[in-house]
Amino acid sequence: MAKKKVPKKAKRRLIVFGPLAVFIIVYCIFTVITTGIDLYSLTHEEKELTNKLTTLKTDASDLKTEITKLQDKDYVARFARENYLYTKNGEYVIKTEEKEKKESKKVKQDEKYIMYICIIIAILIILFIIVKHKKRKKKSSK
């Protein structure tokens, strides 16, 4: 079997358009990855906002019921005694301490892990392209 010689024009085209094609492929992959990350973060944010909206709606309904309860004089008197330590004649106030629950902030580690995985995949794809290009270059030079 005789080896075929690659014409000089084909080599020039490969030299000119090869890196350009690699750049376009890498740019497209990078764009797809960043768009995917943005989409994931937006869906996560949408879920958080819908949860916040539902809690705000329940709070609004609770406040409306509280407004209707505050129209009653007996309820206002009992509320003032419980919350502001007002007393009737002959009553004593015993104060107890309540522990407040503090909400801890959740770190968005899922997004970090996805970003790292996408970067690793992009690096592996670039390395794969480089290795393929070197193999083709060796075959064409023989």
Image (tube, helix red, strand yellow):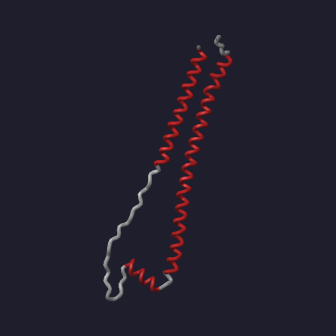
Furthest-front residue in this view? 1
| Residue 126 in the image, given as x and y percentages of width and height | 55, 31
Judge whether 93 appears above or below 29 on screen. below
Q: Identify the residue at image location x=57%, y=28%.
A: 129
* Relative to 110, residue 26 above or below: above
Q: Nearer the viewer, residue 12 or 65?
A: 65
Q: Is residue 5 above or below residue 21?
A: above
Q: Residue furthest bottom?
A: 89
In percent of width and height, residue 138 lies at 57, 18
Outermost residue, top side: 2
Choose top left, top right, bottom left or bottom right for residue 30.
Answer: top right
Which is more toward the observer, 3 or 92?
3
The total number of labels drawn is 0
Q: Residue at x 52, y 32 (%)?
A: 124
User: Residue 118: where, in percent of width, then height?
Assistant: 52, 40
Residue 125 lies in quadrant: top right
Residue in view at x 39 percent, y 62 percent? 102
Q: Is residue 67 left or right of residue 89?
A: right
Q: What quarter of the picture does the C terminus occupy?
A: top right
Q: Is residue 49 left or right of residue 96?
A: right
Q: Is residue 74 left or right of residue 60?
A: left
Quarter of the image that includes the N terminus: top right
Residue at (42% x, 84% y) in the render: 77
**Residue 27, horizontal then vertical, whole percent:** 60, 36
